[in-house]
Each structure stands twice: as structure tokens, then as C-alpha cells.
Image (spheres, rainbow, N blue to C red):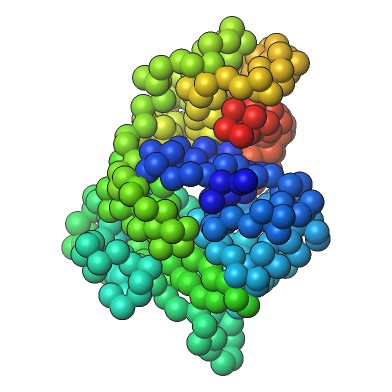
Amino acid sequence: MAAPIRVLWDHSHLWGLLLCRGLAALGADFSPITSREVAEGALWRDPPRLFCVPGGFARRKFAALGPAGVRAVRGYVAGGGCYCGFCGGAGLALSHADGLGLCSWTRLAFADRLDHLVSGHVKLRLDPDSPLCPPFLPPSLTVPVWWPAGFAPPQGEADPDVVVVAAYAGAGPDLMLADIALGAMPEERLAACRRRFGLRLTPAFLEDGACVVAGRFGQGRYVLSHAHLETPDSPEANAWLAHLLGFLARADGLDSRVPAWEPQGDPVRFDDRHLAEARRAMDRAIAAGLAARLLFRRNSWLLGWRPGMPGFSLSNLAAMLAGAAALAPTAAAVAYWREVGPDFAARLAAFTDRLEVYFPARRLEITLSLVDGPDRAEADLAAEGRELFGRAPGGGGLCGELAEVLDGLLWRLLS
């Protein structure tokens, strides 16, 4: 019999790892499931109480599911199943070209590109009458978002089946707009920026935009959250996640706190030479970015970065490596890593060697562009960046190939 909670694994990487880590910390009974398994009928053969979809790119998840997987998820929810999506998993459920169409709402088209670059804690205002909101938490609370998209109702007649469970109510103390510490700026300073220079730093959606919505699809229901309630050491978010699991998956007796995550301090359970070599190489890559002042430490598991730098891609690799080392080896994981591990470690070392040249060169390019003008941009550097990290919004190139290998390892360790 399958676990009562299934987590869609494909194209989630760090966000899938964080959700699985959070579910484990709360004491929930869960297991990952691949898009291929979904397409082959796993959801109807043994329907879980709750189908969770972590963050990541909705478009890539949709493509991985394929037509059969899309029909399977829609059929599961229409038949009485529960869908809970976070960030990219929320976007996957909406009505657009790469969406499941569970919810009639669609993605918000941001007028300002900067609105996509919001991360950290935000203030929310909850619907006090919704059973999805825990009665033991205050009606206003602080939860994390990590580069959220936005929800937009359909044009024309409103859908009465979609309700806003939580709306944004302003910036939290650690909120950042790209690499600007927005949450730490006093309101009077933000107002002065608007008044004197016409600069609006606070994105409009932070004032009353929808952050969590819910509704019905057929006989089932969905909850879609741009708040990452699984984020380590975020007490109000974690308590809300435990409440949702109890309500949607009938999971009783759960803890209400996901502890802080210190990846470098986790005991090593998968003690493998090639994994250790890869982690050391990853440390060198990050050190090169920090030395060039293009990266900075955001917290123990996430980097910050200057706009245009591959900070998240490197955070993703480093966290996945640490997460794999901290999990107990399974027979399937050992067999897989025996086959791919040596080549992976060698490729990551070569990747790091290139980054140790790329980061100082990028720093020099930025400095010279400020002196000589933006036309100074070096074509060779741009080509190197695309080869290493792919095109915007990133996650591709050699870095993406390395992440996919780790994705296969983590799935085998968690299954």
C-alpha cells in the first residue's frame, strides 16, 4: 500500500528535497512519485490521500507528466483526491498552456520584471473563516516566499469555487528584492524613494495580492500556495503546513516545527568518496563566487547573489549534494551511484575549474562596464555563462545536467 501522501519528484530539486525533509520532520508518512509512475496509473491504482507538488518550473513538470500524466492528475482530483501545490506546484494547477486546469485562475502577468525577484518572509492576512487556516495561529502571520509568481482570476465572471485563503499584507523583516534588503528599509525611506526619484521598490502584489488560494475540482479539492510552508526554521509556516496535512491527509499527531537546516553540519550517512569529492569541488565553486563578491551567504542552505549571477543554480547543487550525503544509502541508490558517481565527480571538478576563472572575469566585466559603458560586455563571457548555466531563467547547461544526475540519486535515496 502506498504512503498516504505522495510527492511529485520531477524537476523540483532543492524544493523537492526541502518538502520531503519538512514532511519527515513533521512526522508525516510520505513517499516520492515520478511523473512516469503517475502517467502509468499509480494515482488510481492506489490513490493517496494527498498529492503534493513542490516548487520548481511548472512548465518542466507539465512536460514531464505528458498528456497521460496530466489526465491522470486531473482524474485523481476529479474523483475525490486532494492536490496541494507550492510555488511552481501551485502554478502547475492553474489554467494556462502549461497548466493542469484544476483551478480556473491563471498566472499573473507582472508589469515589472523586478516583481519576480522577491524572496524571504512576507506578512499574510488569513481568512479567519477558512478551515484551512489553523485557529491557533494569529490572523496575520509571517511566512517565506521564494521568487513567487502571482495568481490572477479569469477575466469576466468570477469563479465562486475559488477562494483566497491568504493575502499578502506587506514585507517581512528579511524580504529581499533581488539583492536589496527591502524588508530592512524603513517605510519612510521607501516613501522618499518614490517621492524624490519615482522609484517604487515594494512590488504592488505585496499589498493584498493572493498568496494562497483553494477550491474544488470535480469531487476533489486543491490548495495552491506561493508560500513555502516547508521552509526550515519558519515556525508559523511550519505549523500551518502541519495543520494542512492534518486537514487534507487526515494525518494526526504531527509535530509543528521543521528544524533549521545546517547542511555542512549534517552527519554523513551515505559515505562515498565520489560524493565527498563533489562536495569539496562545490565548496570551491561557491568560494570563487564569494571572493568575487558576486555571491553572498543568505542563510545556511541558500546563497544570495548579484542580479544575473547563477546563485540559485549553485545553491541547488550544493543542497542536493548535502542532502544526498545525509540520507541512508539504499541498494538502488548505491547501484546507481556506482555507475554514475565517478563521472559526476570528474565533471563537477571540471565545472568548478571553469567557475574559478569565470567569476573573477565576470567581476572585471561588470567593473569595466561601469567605467566604459554597457557596450563593453564580452561575447566570450556570455557564451561561457550559457554553456555553464543555460539561458535565463537558468537551471540548464552543464549545471542543469549535473543537477539531473543528483536528482536521480536523491529519488533513489528517498524512495
> Is 135 or 318 nearer to us in this picture?
135
Q: Position of residue 225 (x, y in %)?
A: 46, 61
**Residue under the point 54% across and 34% down:** 316
Location of residue 30 with respect to 352 vertically, above or below: below
**Residue under the point 43% across and 67% down:** 212
> Is 117 or 149 nearer to us in this picture?
149
> Is 148 or 136 nearer to us in this picture?
136
Q: Position of residue 127 (x, y in %)?
A: 32, 75
**Residue under the point 54% across and 16% down:** 270
Q: In the displayed structure, does residue 263 sit left or right of residue 274? A: left
* Viewer can see residue 374: no
Q: Position of residue 367 (x, y in %)?
A: 48, 32
Location of residue 44 (image quadrant): bottom right
Q: Residue furthest front?
A: 1
**Residue under the point 62% across and 10% down:** 274
Location of residue 106 (image quadrant): bottom right
Location of residue 228 with respect to 112 vertically, above or below: above
* Image quarter hosting the C terminus: top right
Location of residue 141 (image quadrant): bottom left
* Viewer can see residue 290: yes
Q: Residue furthest top?
A: 273
Question: How many tags in the picture?
Answer: 0
Location of residue 170 with respect to 215 vertically, above or below: above
Q: Position of residue 190 (x, y in %)?
A: 26, 61
Q: Residue furthest bottom?
A: 157
